Image (cartoon, rainbow, N blue to C red):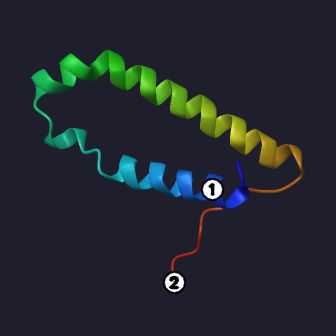
Amino acid sequence: MSTNEAMARLDAAVTALRDVDVAAWSDEALQERLAELSTALCALDAALSRIADGIRARGLRIEEPVSA
């Protein structure tokens, strides 16, 4: 996968995640999806940690963007 394609896919994932608003879900809907959400969140955490660890292993820092 090219660098441009990887970045486009990461941007798409961020956009998709921004659209998830569990506060708008009913308690019943949240309960029904809790196992799926837990699995997805743990997988996301592992993937993000792997990417961040790879960046840090190369001696670079991950910094939050400064707001303009």
Q: Is residue 53 left or right of residue 8?
A: right
Relative to 19, does residue 37 appear above or below in the rendering?
above
Q: Residue at x 61, y 29 (%)?
A: 46
Label 2 sits on what residue type? Ala
* Residue 34 vertical position relative to residue 44 in the rendered view, above or below: above
Answer few, some or many: residues within 10 Å of disc 2's Cα (few below 14, many 20 plus, some between 14 and 19): few
Q: Amino acid at mark 1?
A: Glu
Disc 1: which residue: 5
Count of marks placed on residues: 2
Element carrying mark 2: loop
Q: Which residue is mark 2?
A: 68
Q: Residue at x 76, y 40 (%)?
A: 53
Where residue 14 appears, as percent x and y from the top left, is: 46, 52
Identified at 46% across, 54% down, the residue is 12
Disc 1 to disc 2, how far (Cα)? 27 Å
Q: Quadrant of residue 7?
A: bottom right
The residue positioned 15% from the left and 36% from the top of the image is 25
Label 1 crowd bin: few (<14), some (14–19), many (20+), radius 10 Å: few
As drawn, which residue projects farthest toward the bottom?
A: 68
Instruction: State the image coordinates of residue 18 (x, y, percent, origin top left).
Output: 35, 52
